[in-house]
Image (cartoon, helix red, strand yellow):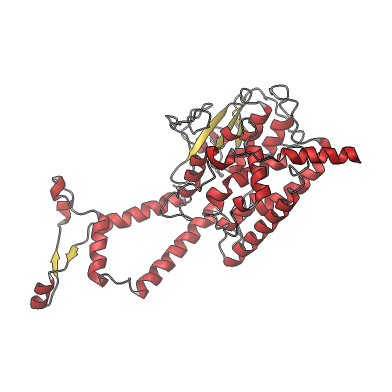
């Protein structure tokens, strides 16, 4: 059982135990003046275990707790001692949960665990025709692989199983696929390769031995060898870009041209720590200094990219590259998740005209929108990251973040490509 599950169970047990205590109620004001005492009505424990008609059943735990608190301090705020005790207890529990959800260094800075299974250049797998991709729709790292798979036309060559987040944060499969009004949008469903109930079960099928580490997405699975091929997102998208051209319907598309590899590396070196991982460093920061450092790095980088995109259609000029795919999957989640839940509040993405137009440019490319399930993205963050949102209340989607509103409006960024070509010809 994970830390999140344990904490949920503990909280449930506390409420259950409270139902074993007496229910206190005050007498009327007039009676109180005469008797100068409170009356106490006790519900025997054995009575709680009996089946009673609905109109005679004992109050639920929430009602009991409310009655007790009203008795102790009426309509006033809880006393300072209680508040400080609850604050200390919650902070300690939060630190415990965060230590497993988001490991940090001694200063409270989030440190992302390294991927366990890597592909080595030239990114080839012996059984390239028996590969299966596991993803989760909320995850930006998994989203990268879905986009490159779609752009390269690898849907038939690399089948996919889509997991959904469980209440304890693990990735689970659905026996019955989630209903979807838009049949073109990807939704969670069954494990189509191994029939497992969760992703941890898939990792445990490895012929070379079980696995006790984190069961993360994306994960590329070798069906024939029953082995994890790779669970590092960037390795997978490089492999999809160049390692399966014999099976791709769009083999001519190269998202990492040789002449641009240097620029792609430079952009990745800036964007990964400050934007891709930067939003997580904001949201998972466990100290004020850690948060301040992360949020400053994030918005300084966004400002720099905004300026660059004034004269450049994509990060590396007129050519869409893997660096753009990696930036896009963070941008598409920014206003609906990171701005609110991860406290990236200095600006919304919509306040950056070039970045927002750039995001719409990529979103409107064929097949990309189908990989963006906004409801699944929001549920996967707000309803699952219990330490950051204990109530699991999912906010309303911001205006302009749905497909048929602002994302589908013209971006006009193709004019930058035309202007650049005209400039080159003039010289």
- Count up the numbered dots: 0
Q: Quadrant of the C terminus?
A: top right
Q: Tell me where residue 207 appears, x and y as whole percent.
A: 58, 31
Q: Is residue 70 visible?
A: yes
- Give the camera-side residue of 417 and 379: 417
Query: What is the residue that sits farthest to the right in this orientation?
Result: 427
Query: Is 105 displayed left or right of 424 in the figure?
Result: left
What residue appears at the point 75 percent right and 48 percent down from the top-left corner? Answer: 267
Q: Is residue 359 above or below residue 351?
A: above
Q: Is residue 177 above or below residue 417?
A: above
What residue appears at the point 16 percent right and 46 percent down from the top-left corner? Answer: 54
Q: Tell me where residue 229 appears, x and y as whole percent.
A: 64, 33
Q: Is residue 117 visible?
A: no
- Give the camera-side residue of 336 and 255: 336
Q: Tell me where residue 62 appears, x and y as whole percent.
A: 27, 57
What residue appears at the point 62 percent right and 46 percent down from the top-left corner? Answer: 330
What residue appears at the point 74 percent right and 44 percent down from the top-left corner? Answer: 315
Q: Tell me where residue 3 appears, x and y as whole percent.
A: 46, 52
Query: Is 218 displayed left or right of 195 in the figure?
Result: right
Query: Is 128 displayed left or right of 121 in the figure?
Result: left
């Amino acid at each position: 059982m994970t830390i999140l599950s344990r904490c949920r169970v503990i909280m449930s047990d506390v409420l259950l135990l409270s139902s074993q205590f007496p229910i206190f109620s005050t007498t009327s004001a007039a009676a109180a003046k005469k008797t100068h005492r409170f009356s106490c009505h006790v519900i025997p424990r054995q009575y709680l275990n009996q089946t009673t008609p609905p109109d005679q059943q004992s109050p639920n735990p929430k009602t009991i707790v409310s009655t007790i608190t009203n008795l102790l301090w009426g309509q006033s705020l809880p006393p300072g001692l209680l508040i400080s005790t609850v604050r200390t207890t919650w902070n300690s529990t939060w630190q415990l949960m965060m230590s497993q959800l988001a490991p940090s260094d001694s200063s409270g800075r989030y440190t992302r665990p390294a991927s366990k299974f890597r592909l080595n250049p030239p990114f080839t797998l012996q059984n390239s025709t028996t590969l299966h991709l596991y993803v989760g729709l909320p995850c930006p790292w998994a989203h990268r692989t879905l986009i490159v798979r779609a752009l390269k036309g690898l849907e038939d060559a690399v089948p996919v199983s889509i997991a959904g987040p469980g209440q304890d944060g693990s990735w689970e499969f659905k026996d019955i696929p989630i209903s979807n009004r838009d049949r073109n949008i990807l939704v969670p469903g069954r494990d189509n390769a191994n029939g497992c109930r969760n992703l941890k079960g898939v990792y445990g099928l490895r012929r070379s031995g079980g696995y006790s580490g984190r069961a993360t997405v994306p994960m590329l699975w070798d069906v024939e060898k029953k082995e994890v091929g790779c669970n590092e997102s960037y390795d997978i998208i490089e492999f999809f870009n160049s390692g399966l051209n014999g099976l791709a319907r769009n083999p001519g598309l190269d998202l990492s041209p040789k002449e641009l590899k240097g620029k792609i590396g430079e952009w990745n070196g800036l964007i990964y720590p400050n934007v891709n991982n930067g939003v997580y460093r904001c949201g998972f920061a466990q100290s004020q200094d850690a948060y301040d450092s992360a949020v400053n790095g994030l918005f300084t980088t966004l400002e720099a990219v905004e300026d660059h995109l004034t004269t450049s259609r994509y990060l590396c000029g007129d050519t869409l590259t893997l660096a753009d795919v990696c930036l896009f999957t963070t941008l598409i989640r920014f206003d609906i998740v990171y701005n609110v839940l991860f406290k990236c509040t200095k600006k919304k993405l919509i306040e950056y005209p070039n970045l927002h137009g750039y995001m719409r440019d990529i979103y409107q490319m064929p097949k990309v929108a189908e990989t963006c399930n906004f409801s699944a993205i929001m549920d996967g963050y707000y309803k699952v990251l219990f330490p950051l949102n204990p109530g699991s209340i999912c906010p309303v989607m911001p205006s302009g973040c749905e497909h048929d509103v602002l994302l589908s409006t013209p971006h006009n960024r193709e004019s930058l490509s035309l202007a650049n070509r005209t400039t080159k010809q003039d010289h």
